[in-house]
Amino acid sequence: MPVDVLAISAHPDDVELTCGGTLVKLKRRGYRFGIVDLTRGEMGTRGTPEIRAREAKRAAEILGAEFRETLDLGDGGLRRGREEELAVIDLIRREKPRLLLTPYPDDRHPDHRRAGQLVTDAAYYAGTRKLETAHAAHRPQQTIYFSTFDFRRPDFLVDVTDVIETRRAAMRAFESQFHREGSTEPPTMLAQTIFLEGIEARARELGAMINVGFAEGFRSRRPPRIDDLVKAFEGSEPGF
Ligand SMILES: [Zn+2]
């Protein structure tokens, strides 16, 4: 059974930090989604690939994913040669998503950048009929980009206020990566209390742009279609 949305990123926890709320909202509307991590996150300072795999599985359950799968394309040097491209093409064909979510192809982090570029190209090639892989050709409607640490203005925002607790719970599933009282793991940027606070502050800031509690921001090559223009700006400060 095809998924409606496939979120593909470089590391376990990328999706939770960027578009987790949006995925929960889609699920509540009856859409099916899957998560693909292109690496096992083996270069992470904290935890081990085994611990991260357990945490990622738990986080996917909390979000309501149909499946979570890991390719092994090399953390800290994500490979995107023809072999890797064909693996992603076939995965897209197998799951037949209508939408793909992936990092900005110009993200600050090289692995995220490579993931975004690899997925963008694979999404296009996946629709090329004469390119043979194990599954039939399928091209998603659109590839949509999320930001990890990019403060440029997104093209559109998704209100995630009513699912923010589920998003928080999914992030907290990555116990080895983020701040935990009494942890003996080495200190990292991610494990500072300000990291998750910063992630949440970002969602607050984006939410403030559309007059809601929390939002997640995206960019896309083509703008989304809006059916109800009046409702789209409901609650905004008049004239602002
Ligand atoms: Zn990452």
Image (cartoon, rainbow, N blue to C red):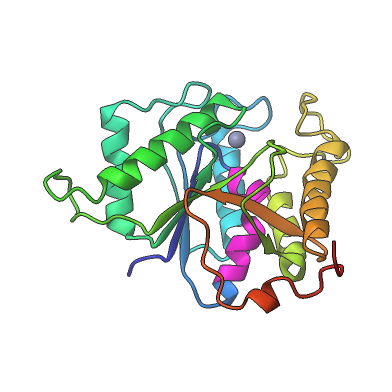
Spot occupied by residue 179 in the image (x, y as percentages of width and height) = 82, 39
Residue toward you, 210 or 87: 210
Residue occupying the point 77% across, 62% down: 210
- In the image, 87: left or right of 210? left
- Split into 4 quadrants, where in the image is the N terminus? bottom left
Vertical relation: 162 (above or below) 47: below
Spot occupied by residue 236 in the image (x, y as percentages of width and height) = 81, 69
Vertical relation: 132 (above or below) 230: above
Vertical relation: 215 (above or below) 72: below
Residue occupying the point 75% across, 71% down: 162
Whether 159 is among the magenta residues is no
- Split into 4 quadrants, where in the image is the C terminus? bottom right
Figure quadrant, ligand 1: top right
Vertical relation: 44 (above or below) 2: above
Looking at the rendered structure, the number of numbered marks drawn on it comes to: 0
Residue interval drawn in magenta: 14-26
- In the image, 20: left or right of 106? right
Spot occupied by residue 57 in the image (x, y as percentages of width and height) = 55, 53
Q: Residue furthest front?
A: 239
- Using the rendered image of the protein, determine whether residue 44 is visible from the camera's viewpoint: yes
Dominant SS type (magenta): helix
Q: Residue furthest left?
A: 130
- Using the rendered image of the protein, determine whether residue 71 is visible from the camera's viewpoint: no
Residue toward you, 52 or 145: 145
Residue toward you, 45 or 94: 94
Whether 23 is among the magenta residues is yes
Residue occupying the point 52% across, 31% down: 113
Spot occupied by residue 140 in the image (x, y as percentages of width and height) = 35, 57
